[in-house]
Image (cartoon, rainbow, N blue to C red):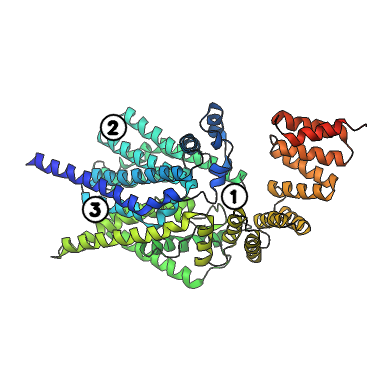
Amino acid sequence: MIREFYNQRRHETIVICLLLAAIILATFWDVQNYDFVFDDGVYVTSNTYVRQGLTGENIKWAMTTTDAGFWHPITWLSLFLDHDLYNLNAGGYHWTNLLFHMANSILLFLLLNRMTGAIYRSGFVAALFAVHPLHIESVAWISQRKDVLSTFFWMLTMWFYISYVKKQCISKYLIVICVFILGLLSKPMLVTLPFVLLLFDFWPLNRTLLFSNKNVAFLLIEKVPLILISIIIGIITFYSEQKAGAVITLESIPLGLRVTNAIITYAEYIKKMVWPQDLAVFYPYFNTLSASNVFLSVLILTVISSFVANEVKKRRYLAVGWLWYVGTLLPVIGIIQIGSHAMADRYTYIPLIGLFIMIAWGIPELLEHWRYKKIWLTGSTVMIILIFIICSRIQTQVWENGITLFSHAITVTKKNYLAQSNLGVALAEHQDYEGAIFHYKEALKVKPDYAAAHNNLGAALVQRGRSDEAIKHFRAALKSNPNYVSAQRHLADELLKKGDYQEAITFYYKVLHIEPDDPELYNNLGVALAGNKNFTLAARYFSTALRINPHYAEARNNLQTIKGISY
């Protein structure tokens, strides 16, 4: 009898795992045909190291770089491997993201089932995680490899933690630490995982029942190594983001506004979980917030928190789910503001699991004595999952390319300067420079000091032969951001064409300080120096360009011309 029960459970487990894989493929199948978008240039297409693949030198770079504002060497290594496998075929990178998401969904199901024995509730949580529209961004955006990869290690850390709890020994705990570190080196979002492990001690592992109140302190002490590692990674991340210029100062966004926005965001994510409408790749941050939105958000959060506090003794899962949601969102809720967005769908990838747990365990208990409970739960579960699959398939199409992505963002949000600017970039890549110019100007109407829009507008104007206008916008970009390397280089190139050699030389020197291995920069600087009658130094820079790239014909011709001049 017992053997038959366990055989049936094993078969049910396998079936649920296969169903999870099937609904994920049904939802995200089309992403294999989608292009690189947005930050994918930073992570793949324009990244020299990624495009060289997995080499010893590149591994060293991955272990030390804070490019893109993060120290996440494991993410870089995964992208190196992808390049070795797929070169620049975007579909391959999408498949890797998709496979990690599939693994995360199945691991989530197996984890919850292992801890609770509630196979169908665990399967429902995993199904919601697998196909919810808020998770599209993490799956369909290649740059969010760090999301799906770090979550994979999150799930593995929890898995090994359960093994450690069952048989506590130092070797099992060391495995927990090692896998946890791998997750942190994929994305620092895992800094909240020690907190989640404490929640799991409370439920469903119920470790607090095994100890007296005095020994509850043991559970805290047990997490100290993990917490210390989290603090170290948190400091490194803050430094990396600050170095990248992504940390917004309190002068730009005051603390009071940040707290208010955080309260609204907590409630907004709940709203989008229930009704995933008007999803966008970027939600602009506004300096004024609706008082009615603030009041309603405070009311929602207060009601939920009060209800959970009142039920904590009877229904521990409610406290665990709610604190999971609130706690794991805390690093990205905007108190420490990274970037100019008010919120981001990708930030919900892990936090929503807490709300899913509350729903999956709460609703069946609410309907416990209803005679039609099984029929209603089965039917509503199938209906909800099908609805989310359809919604996600529709929303996933938005990620097909840059034009579809940012056109949609402009449609569903207001005053979205970043979407306007990036739609311009996407149009420029398709050589629609007039369309690009229009959208850059729309971005500048909303944010007149937006350096990227000025720089990109200048580049588009150059393509249309409007050099004088372009120079004005390059200067405007540098006024907003004096260290903007791309604007410095564009301005230097245009000044060179105009014959303003001395100012061009000044900007070329600034750019070379940041990009010392670019042969074109040395060649252009040589041309500017020659125009300024400094032939000896010009010859030196032409030679440097040829040393970096011996096949650089223009630099060779320029050097030969210089040698033919008497000076």
Task: Name the residue at 57% across, 68% down.
Answer: 288
Task: Tell me, yes or no, if residue 116 can be seen here.
Answer: yes
Q: Which residue is mark 2?
A: 168
Residue 253 visible to an observer of this rendering = no
**Real-space Cα separation, disc 2 to disc 3, in angstroms:** 28 Å
**Residue type (three-letter) at the residue carrying disc 1:** Ala
Quarter of the image with the N terminus is top left
Q: Position of residue 403 (x, y in %)?
A: 54, 58
Q: Nearer the viewer, residue 95 or 233?
A: 95
Work out how far the residue at label 2 is from the one at label 1, CA to CA, in angstroms.
42 Å
Report which residue position mark 3 lands on.
121
In this rendering, position of residue 139 left or right of residue 536: left
Q: Which mark is residue 246?
A: 1
Q: Secondary structure at mark 3?
A: helix
Looking at marks 3 and 1 on the same chain, the residue that comes earlier in the sequence is marked by: 3
Q: Position of residue 88 (x, y in %)?
A: 51, 41
CA gap, disc 3 and disc 1: 40 Å
Does residue 558 appear to the left or right of 176 in the view shown? right
Residue type (three-letter) at the residue carrying disc 2: Gln
Q: Is residue 127 left or right of residue 64?
A: left
Residue 326, image quadrant: bottom left
